[in-house]
Image (cartoon, grey):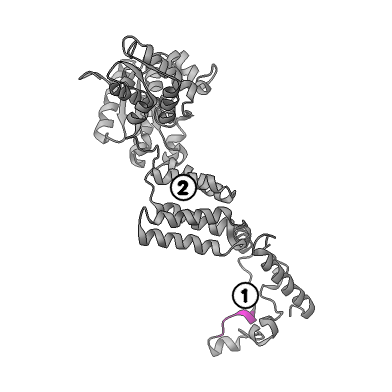
Amino acid sequence: MAPGRAPLADRLRPEKLADVCGQDAILVEGGLLHAALSGGNVPSLVLWGPPGTGKTTLARLLAGRSGMAFEALSAVTSGVKDVREVIARAHTRRLGEQGTLLFVDEIHRFNRAQQDAFLPHIEDGTIVLVGATTENPGFSLIGALLSRVRVVQLAPLGDEALERILERALAHRLHGLEGQHTLDAEARRALCAVSGGDARRLLNVLESAGHLAGGHGAISASQIREAAQARLTAYDASGDDRYDLLSALHKSLRGSDVDAALFWMGRMLEGGEDALVIARRAVAMAAEDVGLADPRALRVALDAVAAVQFLGQPEGELALAEAVIYLATAPKSNSSALALKAARAAAREHADLPVPLHLRNAPTRVARELGHGEGYRYPHDHPHAFVAQPYLPPALSDLTLYAPHEVGEEREIARRLAWWRKLRDRDGGE
């Protein structure tokens, strides 16, 4: 890149709708964005999608098509003073009957008070707000703001869209690389692979690889990979990426797909995630989805937590991998989770039922005179350490909350429960 010249990704930013690639689903005729771009009637929006999918470009096109002034802020670098200055300029334009489209990049990084500050200016038409976010707006934006905007979700760019962007870059005479470089099929596949659905990433790597190629000539797949090697794994440990990958890990463990579970764990570790975050999810999964089908699973997961804490990374990751493999290949049962849910529901419904007298604590003479503990029979004084006596309020004598699954070690639990039920039926519940 020549000194002082803008990066290729900025030079090739689409200036017309026809050059926007990979977002056909939201630009389809009759859709919200197509209508706004065609008719110039732009509502306040939040554009939600991965990096490099065209959020800033669409905001600029919306402003241009509608004749509004374009103002841009970044929630990462802008403060209250910057917002006030933009609003003041928008008020002035409004007096001259020109609207203002305020584009706020990374809008989810504004706190609640900062988000609140936009509301009256959206309401009175001083600004049309177009926010851009890589985070789920339902979690990251306040409800009052969400109620005043339309959320439009952008998709990661597929290989076809990336190929179109590459062709445009290689052919554009004024802003691109016309006549400077060629890429064979292997190099093109490598470039699409390292781009991760991000057009900006594709163009930045292409530009760097061009320098490695000496400014002219063929660019090889190895030069593409070398240009991309400094790239950090696409992973935001503070945002949706973390929770999406944790969800994928948990569901792969639940589904007994050991290879998928290891892959998602590897993705997170390569992205710089704290191994303890993954280990905590393993503990939750062991209790929720393996449960009593293999009670050792919870111990294995807790041991992984201890190993990570004791050894740190990367050594502790070996124990984590062992736990993930164990959990993925263990028999599965959610009977404990179902029993807990049922128990809490029953407790809510029958919150006023008293504890039967024979089960009550009797630490004092007064308590004993009131009948607390009277008639209680100590199971260890009876054969098999079991005695048939009621433990629930009479109104709930038939309540069943735990239903063991016929899998793993729960089969033995089911056998014992059936045996105790037989003893109760034989001896009575009194």
Tag 2: amino acid: Met
Q: Is residue 401 visible?
A: no
- Image coordinates for residue 342, horizontal then vertical, percent: 63, 60
Q: Quadrant of the N terminus?
A: top left
Q: Residue at x 36, y 34 (%)?
A: 106
Q: 393 or 177, which lies in front?
A: 177
In the image, is residue 357 above or below residue 310?
A: below
Position of 110 compared to 422: left or right? left
Tell me which segment is drawn in magenta. 357-362
Residue denoted by label 1: 355
Q: Is residue 16 visible?
A: yes
Q: Is residue 15 magenta?
A: no
Residue placed under numbered mark 2 in the picture:
265
Compared to residue 234, the image places residue 325 above or below, namely below
Q: Are marks 1 and 2 in contact (CB under 8 Å)?
A: no
Q: Amino acid at mark 1?
A: Val
Q: In the rendering, at what x and y percent does residue 43 appear?
A: 44, 23
